[in-house]
Amino acid sequence: MSKARELARSTYDVEYLVIAGGGGGTYGGGGAGGYRCSVSGENSGGGHLAEQSLTLVSGKSYLANVGAGGAAGYTGNSSSFGSIVSAGGGGGLISNSRTANSGGSGAGTQYVANAAGAAGIGFAGQGFAGGVGADGVSAFTSGGGGGGAGGIGSSTSGVSGGGGGIGVSSSINGTSTTRAGGGGGATNNNSGVASSGGAGGGGFGGARTAGGNGTANTGGGGGGGDGSAGSGGSGIVIIRYAGSQRGTGGTVTSSGGYTIHTFTSSGTFTA
């Protein structure tokens, strides 16, 4: 057998979806975890097209690392599969600054010390920036929404919190599912309109109420709160390849002629 034929038999290509943990909210919403996807015809985060598939070596082990969501005010943890790394979503404000944290998607910010803070920026190919908070009438303030994998977090006029940025849809496991939305921003206005999080992102907290948590295994950002804020949702790693099962690891399913391995917590995939 030729060396070329040996190599072809010992490697195969996989498509992946790697989403990091979402950032925790503060007054602004937390950013969604970084979103990287190689499924043909779909998108990665930040408006980018799908990436190239990965070539794996049969019998070799690869770590599927699933990042936890960040607690309120903290950036989420990265997720990875092999050489593919998605950055945790931005969370909260940088200490002693009006700037929110950047990440896979950036966190929304609030109106601080009579000035609008700078929202966090999303990383290229992973997510979008957060929205900017504002000072409203009669001392009401509000926070911007966290950035999502599919869109910028909404800025606000000061009466209501900004909505979280939208997520991105993938059918890698055979079912179209939207994940990695940003968290909604908070307001201290009792009559303010509720600001929802993007897909998986926590909703805002109204006056003296808590923000919602990002949904587990979506990478959603935590909702901002006029009190306690929400934490980010954990990430997920999904890989698939054409044909019958060749590798082991994660929860194994099949759909549309593909074998799918889903990791909702960290583990090892053996090709």
Image (cartoon, rainbow, N blue to C red):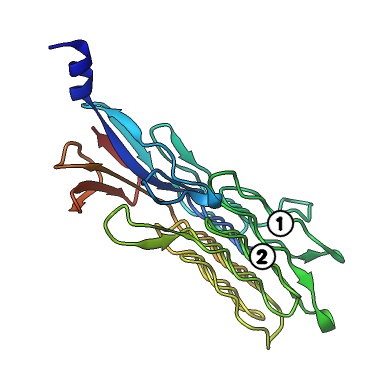
Q: For this rendering, which residue is in front, 175 or 65?
A: 175
Residue furthest to the right: 114
Frontmost residue, 68 versus 178:
178
Residue 119, numbered label:
1
Check disc 1 and give the amino acid type. Answer: Ala
190 vs 168, left or right, is: right
Residue 96 in the image, given as x and y percentages of width and height: 79, 52
Task: Say few, some or many: other residues with alpha carbon within 10 Å of mark 1 (under 14 / 14 to 19 / 20 or more).
Answer: many
Amino acid type of the residue tagged 2 in the rendering: Gly
Is 60 placed above or below 215 here?
above
Provide residue 239's location: percent of width, then percent of height.
Answer: 31, 44
Residue in view at x 23 percent, y 19 percent: 7
Which residue is at a point 42% across and 62% down the rendered structure image? 178
Mark 2 = which residue?
28
Q: Secondary structure at mark 1?
A: loop
Relative to 98, 108 lies left or right: left
Q: Secondary structure at mark 2?
A: loop
Mark 1 vs 2: CB contact within 8 A: yes
| 134 up-or-down from 52: above or below | below
Picture disc at residue 88: none
Residue 26, image quadrant:
bottom right
Q: Residue at x 54, y 51 (%)?
A: 47
Work out which quarter of the rendered image holds the C terminus and state it: top left
Per the model, the C-alpha gap separating discs 1 and 2 is: 9 Å
Q: Residues within 10 Å of mark 2 (few under 14, many from 20)?
A: many
Could you say which quadrant of the image residue 55 lies in? Answer: top left
Q: How many marks?
A: 2
